Image: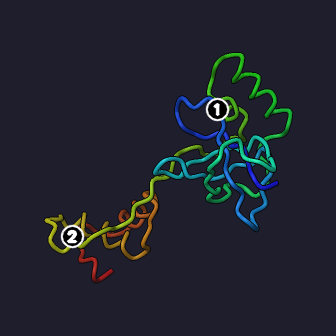
Amino acid sequence: MNYAEVAVNSPGRRSTFSYAIPPGLSIHAGQAVWVPFGNRVIQGIVIRLSDEPSVAETKEIAGIVTDSPLLSPVQMQLAQWMSERYFAPLFDALALMLPPGFGRRTIAYFQATGSPAELPLTPEQRLVLHIIEKKRRQACLSWRKQLAGQRLGRSPANS
């Protein structure tokens, strides 16, 4: 199977979206994955696998959240029935059956662009920018943790 139909964690989305499965990535129905959606990367649940996409152009699945399926075929059938019967987004119906403690939040990534030398930044803003520049692309939660561990006003060059 080369394609996956994915229910995405985006408000108001009742349908699924087709994504190409990258070579070497093992995907199963019921598995949680990261997918590009607009200018973000969000969580989704694989509903089914197929040899053909349901649309002409597809993007690739960005990665897996879990190594194995979180939902059984029976749970997925129940969620699809709930979604159709109550006109609820499919991901919301699926989320009711996810294991306790499984997070379903969106992760924001930041990437530095341009030259920050001319910008009037506070010491805290310069520190955040330095953290983001070190890794090229940084998740918001990651730099928040790093920032919390450092004193404000400390020079980024010394960290």
Residue 136 location (% of width, % of height): 42, 72
Question: Which one is nearer the viewer's eye here, 122 or 57?
Answer: 57
- Mark 1 or mark 2: whose residue is earlier in sequence: 1
Residue 35 location (% of width, % of height): 60, 52
Dividing the image into 4 quarters, which one contains the N terminus? bottom right
Picture quadrant of residue 153: bottom left
Picture quadrant of residue 94: top right
The residue sitting at 43% across, 62% down in the picture is: 145
**Residue marked by disc 1:** 15
Dividing the image into 4 quarters, which one contains the C terminus? bottom left
Question: Which one is nearer the viewer's eye here, 98 or 30?
Answer: 30
The residue sitting at 24% across, 74% down in the picture is: 154
Identify the secondary structure beneath mark 1.
loop
Residue 129 location (% of width, % of height): 30, 68
Q: Is residue 11 left or right of residue 150?
A: right
The residue sitting at 28% across, 77% down in the picture is: 156
**Residue marked by disc 2:** 153
Question: Which one is nearer the viewer's eye here, 105 or 158?
Answer: 105
Question: Which one is nearer the viewer's eye here, 32 or 143?
Answer: 32
Q: Does residue 110 sit above or below 31 in this rendering?
A: below
Q: Does residue 47 sit above or below 13 in this rendering?
A: below
Using the numbered discs, state the Cα–Cα distance from disc 1 to disc 2 in whole angstroms.
48 Å
Residue 141 location (% of width, % of height): 45, 57
